[in-house]
Amino acid sequence: MSISAARESFSQPFPHASKLAAVLDANDAVDPVHLVACHRGVTEQQAIRQLGFPDATIVPRDFGVYVADDTQGIQILFLQECRTDAAIKSQVDAALDWLDRAQEDEPLLRRAALRADLVRLVDRRRRSWSSAVDPALPVGSGEPRALGVAASPDLSESAQIAERDGPLRGGAAR
């Protein structure tokens, strides 16, 4: 996490997650748990900085740091000391073992399903906005125009998701 080129290539993938909607739909999948193999160690602060906001469950463990956000469904396992294939396998095994012992399997799947729902919702909204662009307005003209687009019933979809799934159980540490 201390190598700037590595941080930049990982960046923060979540603002562009809606691009995964087609893949999720095609495979009837939930959003992935992101695995980040770090060459050296990783701190809680580095994990928070990479996530982009501090309001998440951050759990430091021997394998690295587990990050879970119950609001957006983002989940990341930062694995430390991943210098060889064997070390990566060992850290993945340790993380999976901890998730099992901590009984995080159900919350993990619920967050993943929530994230997939949000990704699909954002994708649909993004596509509807793209199709509502006024073709008479030159691209880059800098002149915003109201298009008179009425509020869509899709706006209530996130409320329906929250109502259906109920409150999510928090992680092991806050």
Image (cartoon, helix red, strand yellow):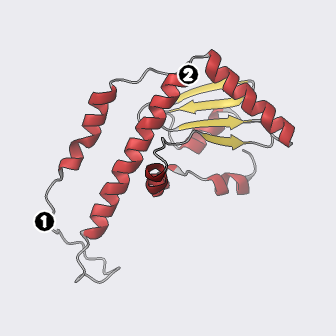
Residue 56 image position (x, y, % from top left): 50, 31
For the residues labelled 2 and 1, the Cα–Cα distance comes to 45 Å
- From the image, tell me which residue sits under label 2: 104
* SS label for mark 2: loop
Identity of the residue drawn at 49% across and 30% down: 109
Residue 32 image position (x, y, % from top left): 55, 42
The mark nearer the N terminus, 2 or 1, is: 2
Q: With respect to residue 130, does 170 lie above or below? A: above
Q: Amino acid at mark 1?
A: Gly
Query: Horizontally, is 160 left or right of 10 in the view?
Result: left
Identity of the residue drawn at 59% across and 42% down: 49
Farthest residue toward the front? Answer: 27
- From the image, tell me which residue sits under label 1: 148
Q: With respect to residue 157, does 167 lie above or below? A: above
- Locate the N terminus by quadrant: top right
Q: Amino acid at mark 2?
A: Glu
Q: Residues within 10 Å of mark 1 (few under 14, many from 20)?
A: few
